[in-house]
Image (cartoon, rainbow, N blue to C red):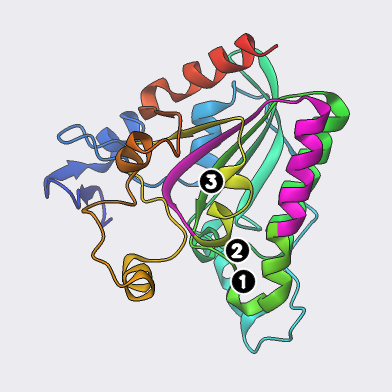
Amino acid sequence: MIGKWVKCDDCKEIIYKEELHNNLSVCPNCGKHFRLSARRRIRQIADENTFKEIGSEITTKNPLNFNGYLKKVEVLKEKTKIEEAVKCGSCKIKGEKSILCVMDGNFLMGSMGSAVGERITLAIETAIEKKLPLVIFCVSGGARMQEGIVSLMQMAKTSSAISKLHKAGNLFISVLTDPTTGGVTASFASLGDIILAEPRALIGFAGPRVIEQTIKQKLPKEFQSSEFLLEHGFIDKIVQRKDMKETIAKLIRLHK
């Protein structure tokens, strides 16, 4: 994005930035869903003035003393005006009380480190305690390499918490956005009672080149797109951004 204009990567059209924002960051020419910050997503999904953040005190640590890691995180905090790659809180969605987690790809590509895993786990536990449905908007490049095995452990941690949520009978709606990959896909993102996705989102675990080298086969075209995954039963529905809030609210009402 440069100045007041944005170029769409799909149709190559130049769009006035304000027009794009007014259209929920969806290209008015070809329908490409641009990536959203957590703040903008929360404004689109949560009813006005109902989002109350939880877990904001949980911030990045450096368990491996990775050189330059915390300095990079501080620069990102200043640039993005957020503290971590996920924001969690309680809110209302069309009047329905919910726990909402929104990952932000602007913060280290939404990678999952110990703070992200702890925030999401706290949100899950809050949903269980308050008997509320859980909605998670996923966007991630995978595990955070600077935290090594501590990052990978968040997959088991969040999956275990989701298992407790299921046993408690709470509804969990997982929404996969572009891109949802790596350890997030391999843990809580794929464990929703209902899995929604935005159009043309990249969803997968490893990259196509790695998979092709492993299985020694040529992969189908766009096999990691939300459309391909819907066709093969991995997700339940593709939802346009303009319909997302209403769709989630309807699902919550149906499962009350």
Residue shown at 28%/55% (left/top)?
1
Disc 1, disc 2: CB below 8 Å?
yes
Question: Quick check: 72 above or below 114?
Answer: below
The magenta region covers 156-181
Measure the alpha-carbon separation of dots 2 and 3. Answer: 20 Å
- Mark 1 vs mark 3: give the one in front: 3
Residue ranking furthest to the front: 216
**Disc on the earlier residue, 2 or 3:** 2
Regarding mark 1 in the picture, which secondary structure is present there? helix
- Secondary structure beneath dot 2 equals helix
| Circle 2 or circle 3, nearest the eye | 3
From the image, tell me which residue sits under label 3: 138
Q: Quadrant of residue 189?
A: top right
Q: Answer few, some or many: residues within 10 Å of disc 3's Cα (few below 14, many 20 plus, some between 14 and 19).
A: many
Q: Are marks 1 and 3 in contact (CB under 8 Å)?
A: no
Examine the structure image and report whether residue 135 is included in the region drawn in magenta: no
Query: How crowded is the residue under tag 2: few (<14 C-alpha within 10 Å), some, or many (20+)?
Result: some
For disc 1, the neighbor class at 10 Å (few under 14, some 14 to 19, many from 20) is some
The mark nearer the N terminus, 1 or 3, is 1
Query: From this viewpoint, is residue 138 visible?
Result: yes
The C terminus: image quadrant: top right
In the displayed image of the protein, which residue is found farthest to the bottom? 67
The residue beneath circle 1 is 73
Q: Label 1 amino acid?
A: Val
Q: What kind of residue is marked 3?
A: Cys
Q: What residue is shown at x 60% (from left), y 70% (from top)?
A: 144
Which amino acid, by three-letter code, is at mark 2? Lys
Residue 175, position in %: x, y? 51, 37
Residue 179 pos. (x, y %): 41, 53
* Magenta span includes 167: yes
Mark number displayed over residue 77: 2
